[in-house]
């Protein structure tokens, strides 16, 4: 997260609010996919190969696990543009 903060500052912005929303993104998305896989699988297989759906399914499981372990995150930032002479 420090690298992100540095990049934002370096590009003339100041973070005025930060919210960790990963728990509201990754787990619910994965849970939805896993609970509705049969229906979603039919839609996916109408356009893509079984291999693509299998990758998506495995990715959802890994994403959920990584989120629960705190290995991945998702933050929403509210920033303001700094005046050119404030950097």
Image (cartoon, helix red, strand yellow):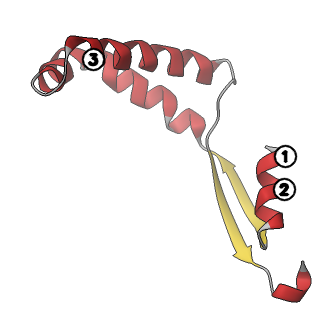
Q: Which residue is mark 1?
A: 2
Pick the front one: 7 or 61: 7
Q: How many circles with numbers are drawn on the protein?
A: 3
Q: Residue at the location (71% across, 55% down)?
A: 18
Q: Earlier in the sequence, mark 3 or mark 1?
A: 1
Q: Quadrant of the N terminus?
A: top right
Q: Which residue is mark 3?
A: 53
Between marks 2 and 1, how big is the CA–CA gap?
A: 6 Å
Q: Residue at the location (76% across, 50% down)?
A: 4
Q: Secondary structure at mark 2?
A: helix
Q: Earlier in the sequence, mark 3 or mark 2?
A: 2
* In this view, 39 is above or below 73: above
* In this view, 60 is above or below 87: above
Q: Secondary structure at mark 3?
A: helix
Query: In the shown orientation, is residue 14 left or right of residue 23?
Result: right
Q: Quadrant of the C terminus?
A: bottom right
Where is residue 58 drawn, in percent x and y? 41, 12
Q: Which residue is mark 2?
A: 6
Circle 1 residues within 10 Å: few <14, some 14–19, many ≥20: few
Pick the front one: 67 or 44: 44
């Amino acid at each position: 997260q420090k690298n992100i903060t540095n990049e934002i500052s370096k590009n003339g912005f100041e973070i005025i609010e930060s919210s960790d929303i990963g728990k509201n993104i990754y787990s619910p998305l994965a849970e939805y996919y896993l609970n509705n896989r049969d229906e979603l699988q039919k839609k996916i297989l109408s356009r893509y190969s079984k291999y693509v759906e299998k990758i998506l399914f495995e990715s959802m499981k890994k994403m959920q696990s990584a989120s629960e372990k705190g290995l991945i995150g998702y933050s929403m930032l509210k920033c303001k543009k700094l005046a050119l002479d404030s950097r």
